[in-house]
Amino acid sequence: MNDSATASPATPSRVPQASAQRIRAIRRWTADLWSLRIERPAGFRFQPGHYLRLGLPVETPASAVWRPYSIVSAPDDEALEIVLVRVPDGAFTSQLARLGEGDPVLLEQAVFGFFLESQLAPGDTLWMLATGTGIGPYVSLLRTPGALDRHRRAVLVHSVRRADELSYRDEIEAAVAASGGRLHYLPVVTRDTVGGTLSGRIPRLIDDRLLQSAADAALEPTGSRVMVCGNPAFTTDMRALLSARGFTPCRRGSPGTMLFEKYW
């Protein structure tokens, strides 16, 4: 998700234990947004919300550049799936964009992160808020049977600039239809006018109560739990907004009411 050479989680100082895995399938959402499915090594285990690290070039692992990507797959999937966007002038995503099915990438053996639904205290309504490729961990949750059973309702909000960037929309809408009213999906498009979507930045939609009205659900710390995954400006704004409303962060050994992905 991050193509910055200065991102400390993305560029380890040590040489990671890794293996070369081949790309099994590519799905193009737009010219600059796509999903990859790569081979999954035996024993590679994860939970929804974990992220993996890919490295290039394959030929020189000791000098490879590494980048983190949230896992979109369910834990029982035979392949590993990620969703990514080409970063302008980003060397790593430009290299990935040139790869095709059958080409290898380096996969670090470990998984990372604490963006796990189980970190939250039990609650009535789970809000899953995403911008862009931040939708990935939530698709993994939807693909995992029972992953959202601790909550009576779940609301998935996905904000993008253009309507064609609403990756996984058909799959999410199918999950909504099969949920018996427990799952709600609110697509947000900021630069197009599209029927059936909201328009505007998520923090503003919350302040104006448009998001809560569209979901027919409250957003308050007594019964709501919030997961936030997206670009740094979005997560910074959401942390300030939620903190001001009384939400508390998750800490080791102390479940909270709001949870943020932190690997950017």
Image: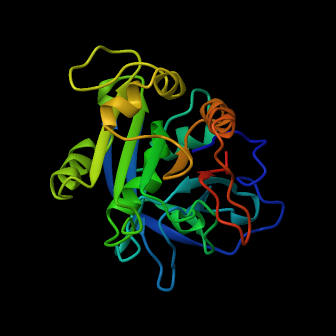
Where does the N terminus fall, quadrant-wise? top right
In this view of the protein, which residue sits in the foreground, 114 or 218? 218
Color scheme of the displayed model = rainbow
Q: Where is residue 204? Give x, y as percent.
A: 52, 21
Displayed quadrant of residue 114: bottom right
Where does the C terminus fall, quadrant-wise? top right
In this view of the protein, which residue sits in the foreground, 49 or 89? 49
Q: Residue at x 37, y 28 (%)?
A: 188
Displayed quadrant of residue 103: bottom left
Q: Where is residue 91? Give x, y as percent.
A: 62, 38
The answer to whether residue 17 of the structure is visible from this angle is yes
The answer to whether residue 24 of the structure is visible from this angle is no
Q: Residue at x 37, y 41 (%)?
A: 217
- Image height of 123 relative to 5, above or below: below
Q: Residue at x 68, y 59 (%)?
A: 250
- Image height of 124 relative to 21, above or below: above
Q: Residue at x 36, y 69 (%)?
A: 149
Side (left or right) of 124 relative to 245: left
Q: Where is residue 78? Give x, y as percent.
A: 34, 75
- Image height of 109 relative to 243, above or below: below
The extreme front residue here reads 222
The extreme bottom residue here reads 43
Side (left or right) of 205 relative to 95: left
Side (left or right) of 44 relative to 150: right
Displayed quadrant of residue 179: bottom left
How many callouts does the rendering have? 0
Q: Where is residue 221? Give x, y as percent.
A: 57, 48
